């Protein structure tokens, strides 16, 4: 999970686009001359029948139901919630399962366990003395994934380098010797650099620290607020039972200078307090909802998926919108009893904390079962008001700045079939488009085991670039307008609770659901890509994504 002050889908370039006309507003252009009742009665097996049946009122009713579920199931912080591992998520899963059973699908709720972490209250970080003042959450500091309350004098670790060098050179807190002479009970002040953040915390704990403050290193590009992941030397995440506060370089330098001045003047040391009231359960039950159509060749299965969980709170944009998209399509296709290929609709849990639901599902299949899945289509955020019109393409650059993911041609070339179906529909509506890598979406776990995939997404409420404004209209995307910083907006901030129904545009939702329906219908009746889907039995030893979620934060 990511707070809004962490990196979120930083799109520094456009990967591809077409159509010269920039669309400044979205409105579904296909007239809804047919009623919902008529749509429910007919066999929607062609685009001319299915797409007009994708209607705004039906989609919005599903969205209202999801909001109602969140409202009725507050999380530990008392706010509406559909987060993984909470009653609101299970209620969402039960709701989807009931709707799909009523539509005639065979439904299973697949259980698995996740590491559950949630805030019970708003974390705080203050200087108590010599000058009492609070630090601003999300601007001055951010909480590491940790537990506890500490109020004590600070003490810097060894290895701090001030003033900082031009390039990273600090190794503060990276060895136990950096805590020689540390007084147990104090809060450790540690500079970023040299090793994983979790290693610094473990060494501080070993020296008896009751809390940890990690400040940015101060080199060019390493001065602002960065809230990192707490992982050990082997990259394994953990949740320490002492509170960890991440701060800007300026605040860390100020605290360090205050400590040095107090020591030199033999006056009382500066005292800080950190409070992170949270819950951690390493074995919380979670569910995927899997619904199979009655017809179609099960040796040639198309998986149609969305993640059902929220990141913080109601999660109406991310991702009740995508969940509503595939639910409405499934309901409108309930009478399509003989598609060429079998349709399997899946609502995954745990996406926001590491693509866990889709990883569990893929890893639970035998090699033969995997070989019968010929395609995956993923709907991840489909109603952004300040939208981009994104289409998944495995050849698009990794938007997280990592190495370009390489896939064999059987994955890449086949993925273009679904991709181009979405592009074709958007072009027919006079809309531009943008290609996105599947990294950070559930589609990525299918790509990793050799299954071609595509899908749609409309971007977050945090990260719209000027190039995207030029393509799609709207405005630069960042919740506070602090361009070029991309900070997560409503969706990624655990303390705004604003990803509610009002954070969605029903017209965008309708357009993108029709776009996605065009992909689903195309792959349901595909005879070229899908006919080869059971020719290869994929190895169970192929890697499954672990910490590849779009929400991963730097670990050092």
Image (spheres, helix red, strand yellow):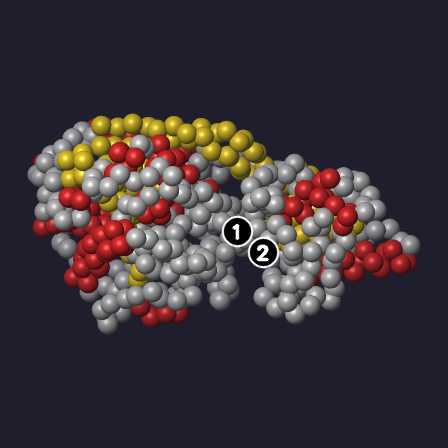
CB contact under 8 Å: marks 2 and 1: yes
Left or right placement of residue 321 versus residue 374 in this view? right
**Residue 211, quarter of picture:** top right
- Horizontal and vertical percent for residue 307? 35, 41
Discs 2/1, front: 1
Image side of residue 67 versus residue 421, left or right: right
Q: Which residue is mark 1?
A: 553
Measured along the vertical axis of the image, is residue 522 above or below residue 539? below
For image coordinates 74% across by 64% down, the residue present is: 162
> What secondary structure is marked by label 1?
loop
Q: State the residue at coordinates (23%, 37%).
A: 372
Relative depth, front residue between 36 and 237: 237
Taking 156 as reference, is 84 above or below it? Answer: above
Residue 345 position, x and y percent, is: 25, 37
Q: Position of residue 16 (x, y in %)?
A: 30, 66
- How busy is the neighbourhood of tag 2: few (under 14 within 10 Å), some, or many (20 plus)? many
Q: Going 38% across and 55% down the picture, which residue do you hit?
A: 405
Q: Earlier in the sequence, mark 2 or mark 1?
A: 2
Q: CA distance from mark 2 to mark 1?
A: 9 Å
Disc 2 target residue: 226
Res 10 label: none
* Secondary structure under the numbered disc 2 in the rendered image: loop
Q: Residue at 37% across / 69% down in the picture? A: 467
């Amino acid at each position: 999970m990511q707070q809004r002050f962490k990196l979120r889908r930083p799109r520094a370039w456009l990967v591809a686009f077409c159509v010269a006309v920039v669309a400044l507003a979205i409105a579904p252009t296909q007239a809804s001359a047919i009623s919902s009742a008529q749509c429910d009665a007919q066999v929607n097996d062609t685009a001319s029948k299915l797409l007009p049946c994708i209607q705004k009122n039906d989609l919005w009713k599903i969205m209202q139901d999801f909001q109602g579920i969140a409202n009725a199931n507050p999380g530990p912080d008392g706010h509406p919630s559909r987060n993984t591992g909470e009653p609101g998520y299970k209620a969402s899963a039960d709701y989807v399962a009931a709707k799909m059973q009523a539509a005639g699908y065979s439904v299973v709720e697949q259980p698995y366990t996740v590491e559950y972490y949630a805030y019970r209250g708003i974390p705080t970080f203050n200087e108590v003395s010599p000058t009492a003042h609070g630090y601003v959450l999300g601007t001055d500091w951010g909480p590491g994934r940790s537990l506890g309350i500490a109020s004590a004098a600070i003490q810097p670790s060894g290895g701090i380098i001030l003033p900082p060098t031009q390039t990273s050179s600090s190794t503060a807190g990276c060895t136990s010797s950096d805590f020689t002479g540390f007084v147990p009970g104090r809060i450790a002040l540690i500079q970023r650099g040299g090793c994983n953040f979790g290693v610094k915390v473990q060494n501080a704990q070993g020296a008896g620290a009751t809390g940890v403050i990690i400040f940015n290193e101060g080199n060019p590009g390493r001065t602002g607020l960065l809230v990192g992941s707490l992982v050990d030397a082997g990259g394994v995440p953990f949740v320490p039972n002492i509170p960890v506060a991440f701060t800007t370089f300026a605040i860390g330098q100020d605290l360090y200078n205050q400590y040095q001045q107090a020591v030199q003047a033999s006056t009382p040391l500066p005292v800080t307090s950190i409070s992170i009231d949270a819950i951690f359960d390493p074995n919380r039950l979670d569910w995927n909802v899997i619904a199979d159509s009655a017809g179609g060749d099960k040796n040639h299965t198309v998986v149609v998926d969305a993640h059902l969980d929220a990141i913080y709170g109601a999660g109406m944009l991310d991702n009740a919108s995508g969940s509503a998209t595939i639910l409405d399509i499934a309901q409108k296709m309930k009478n399509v009893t003989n598609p060429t290929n079998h349709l399997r609709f899946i609502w995954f849990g745990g996406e926001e904390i590491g693509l866990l639901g889709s990883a569990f599902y893929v890893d639970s299949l035998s090699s033969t079962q995997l070989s019968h899945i010929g395609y995956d289509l993923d709907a991840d955020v489909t109603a952004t008001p300040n939208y981009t019109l994104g289409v998944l393409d495995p050849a698009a650059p990794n938007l997280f700045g990592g190495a370009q993911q390489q896939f064999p041609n059987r994955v890449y070339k086949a993925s273009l079939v679904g991709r181009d179906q979405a592009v074709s529909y958007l072009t027919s509506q006079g809309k531009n488009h943008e290609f996105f890598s599947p990294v950070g979406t559930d589609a990525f776990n299918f790509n990793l085991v050799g299954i071609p995939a595509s899908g749609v997404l409309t971007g977050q409420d945090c990260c719209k670039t000027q190039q995207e404004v030029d393509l799609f209209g709207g405005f630069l995307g960042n919740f506070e307008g602090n361009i070029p910083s991309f900070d997560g907006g409503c969706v990624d901030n655990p303390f705004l609770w604003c990803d509610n129904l009002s954070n969605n545009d029903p017209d965008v939702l309708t357009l993108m659901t029709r776009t996605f329906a065009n992909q689903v219908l195309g792959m349901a009746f595909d005879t070229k890509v899908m006919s080869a889907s059971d020719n290869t039995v994929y190895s169970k030893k192929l890697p499954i994504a672990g910490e590849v979620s779009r929400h991963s934060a730097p670990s050092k």
